[in-house]
Image (spheres, rainbow, N blue to C red):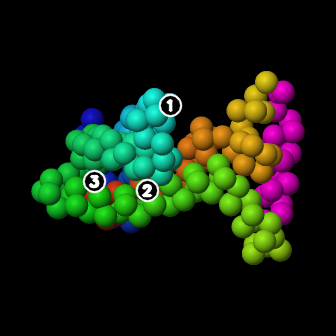
């Protein structure tokens, strides 16, 4: 696959064909990014679950940090070689990626802990209740209520206002994917 850092913008080409090529290149970039992200997420999740299930690490935050580190390595190498033009040196590019990913990892871990322990829902019921928080809680509870009985216990934690580690991981990883794509595309690999 050809890295897509040299994508021509429609304004540069001034044509409909330029727009089609730009959208095609963007779709290829997003597809390759998704594949690298899936691989990195699987590595992250496997490390997290192996550490937690075997008892090697008892802290969710510590296990998540170690898993995130494994996923980060896969993400950097995949993005450098298959998604974006890796024009920077490995040291500079990896340092930039680590800086951005530390922020994303902290957000990811905070979101996971907040979801599994219910703090997110407490926040939605309190400070932001009047601006949609209660609606989000209602949506979550409705979602749980329509699930088959055998699936519901896998979605929630100890109460209907906490989530399982797996669902918290999926929600946190989805948020992290959007943030890391933007960080990689516009900061680390400076794609046009």
Question: Considering the numbered disc 2 on the image, is that residue within a helix, a strand or a loop?
Answer: helix
Q: Residues within 10 Å of mark 3 (few under 14, many from 20)?
A: many
Return the residue at label 2. 105
- x 68%, y 60%: residue: 119
Return the residue at label 3. 5
- x 47%, y 51%: residue: 61
Q: Earlier in the sequence, mark 3 or mark 1?
A: 3
Q: Position of residue 82 (x, y in %)?
A: 27, 40
Return the residue at label 1. 53
Question: Considering the numbered disc 1 on the image, is that residue within a helix, a strand or a loop?
Answer: helix
| C-alpha gap between disc 3 and disc 1 | 41 Å
Q: Position of residue 7 (x, y in %)?
A: 31, 54
Q: Nearer the viewer, residue 103 or 64?
A: 64
Q: Identify the image quadrant of residue 189.
A: bottom left
Q: Inspect this view and state whether residue 136 appears.
A: yes
Magenta stretch, overall SS: helix
Q: Nearer the viewer, residue 69 or 41?
A: 69
Q: Nearer the viewer, mark 2 or mark 1?
A: 1
Q: What is the quadrant of the C terminus in the image?
A: bottom left
Q: Earlier in the sequence, mark 2 or mark 3?
A: 3
């Amino acid at each position: 696959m050809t890295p897509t850092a040299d994508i021509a913008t429609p304004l540069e080409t001034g044509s409909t064909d330029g727009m089609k090529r730009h959208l095609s290149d963007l779709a290829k970039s997003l597809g390759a990014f998704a594949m690298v992200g899936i691989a990195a997420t699987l590595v992250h999740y496997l490390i997290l679950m192996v550490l937690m299930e075997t008892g090697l690490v008892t802290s969710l935050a510590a296990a998540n940090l170690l898993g995130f580190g494994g996923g980060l390595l896969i993400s950097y190498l995949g993005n450098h070689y298959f998604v974006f033009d890796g024009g920077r040196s490995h040291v500079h590019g990896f340092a930039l990626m680590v800086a951005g990913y530390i922020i994303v990892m902290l957000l990811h871990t905070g979101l996971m802990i907040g979801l599994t322990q219910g703090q997110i829902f407490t926040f939605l019921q309190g400070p932001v209740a009047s601006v949609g928080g209660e609606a989000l809680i209602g949506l979550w509870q409705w979602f749980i209520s329509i699930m088959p009985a055998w699936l519901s216990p896998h979605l929630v934690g100890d109460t209907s206002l906490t989530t399982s580690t797996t669902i918290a991981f999926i929600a946190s990883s989805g948020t992290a994917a959007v943030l890391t794509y933007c960080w990689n595309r516009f900061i680390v690999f400076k794609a046009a």
